[in-house]
Image: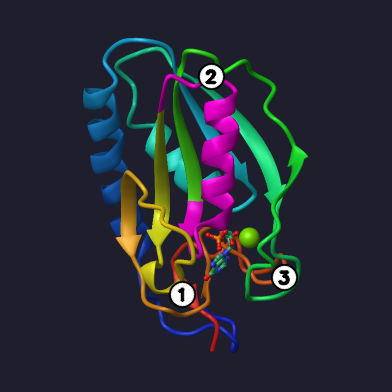
Amino acid sequence: MEKFETVGEVMITEEQIRARAAEIGKLISEEFKEGELIFVGILKGAVMWMSDVIKNVSNRDMTIDFMIVSSYGASTKSSGIVKIVKDLDTDIKDKNVIIVEDIVDSGITLNYLKQYFEGRGAKNLRICTLLDKPAGRRVDLVPDYVGFVVEDKFIVGYGLDFDQKYRQLPYISFLK
Ligand code: IMP
Ligand code: MG
């Protein structure tokens, strides 16, 4: 497979991600058999992962929504400040909400979003992340559904960017 010079080896393949998404989609379907279910993707990073997961929740009604939050800018370290750039279009009160993220690093973004969603009256809240980078954690946050645990590298591909680039890579890799 052709690669950018700045991008390292393939860490996780598309096939591995799809297979894991199928497992997680089934787990979510089993956990939430009743009640309204909404998946909220955090743009832009979560697009590919979210599309893979929701294809596997085919046994019940569900809806999707998206938010845009920003905290990073063009740096590889979190600024610690979370800003809502695009809010929900949907009322989530009394609904089962699955927040879909690309990666949990410091945990600051999801910690903020969790409180925000609880404030809006979500009944059950779960976090479904493609990647978990526990080494980066700065707040106490444990995601409920994790695709893969990654080491402390700056990850790109499959939706994850550096300065808006590399999101299109059909695999998970890292910046050299
Ligand atoms: P956190 O608030 O530090 O947990 O980071 C949340 C956001 O930072 C994620 O949604 C990503 O957009 C971005 N981020 C954190 N680590 C990485 C990485 O290794 N590669 C690309 N983006 C990252
Ligand atoms: Mg990002």
Q: Amino acid at mark 2?
A: Gly
User: Does residue 160 belong to the magenta stretch?
Assistant: no
Label 2 close to label 3 by CB (< 8 Å): no
Packing grade of label 2 (10 A; few <14, some 14-19, many >=20) is some
The residues bearing labels 1 and 2 have C-alpha atoms spaced at a distance of 37 Å
How is this picture coloured? rainbow
Q: Is residue 44 above or below residue 89?
A: below
Packing grade of label 1 (10 A; few <14, some 14-19, many >=20) is many
Locate residue 141, reporting x and y percent. 41, 53
Task: Tell me the SS state at disc 1.
Answer: strand
Locate residue 148, reporting x and y percent. 32, 60
Disc 1: residue Cβ within 8 A of ligand 1's nearest atom: no
Q: Amino acid at mark 3?
A: Asp
* Residue 135 location, quadrant: bottom left
Q: Amino acid at mark 1?
A: Ser
The residues bearing labels 2 and 3 have C-alpha atoms spaced at a distance of 34 Å
Q: Nearer the viewer, residue 45 or 128?
A: 128
Quarter the C terminus occupies: bottom right
Q: Residue drawn 72% across and 70% down? A: 163
Q: Which residue is mark 3?
A: 163
Q: Residue drawn 64% across and 68% down? A: 78
Q: Which residue is mark 1?
A: 173
Mark 1 or 2 closer to N-term? 2
The disc label shown at residue 121, or none: 2
Q: Residue drawn 69% across and 67% down? A: 79
Q: Which residues are magenta?
A: 102-124
Locate residue 111, reporting x and y percent. 52, 48
Q: Is residue 78 above or below residue 52?
A: below
Task: Tell me the SS state at disc 3.
Answer: loop
148 to the left or right of 66? left
Quarter of the picture for ligand 2? Answer: bottom right
The residues bearing labels 3 and 1 have C-alpha atoms spaced at a distance of 15 Å
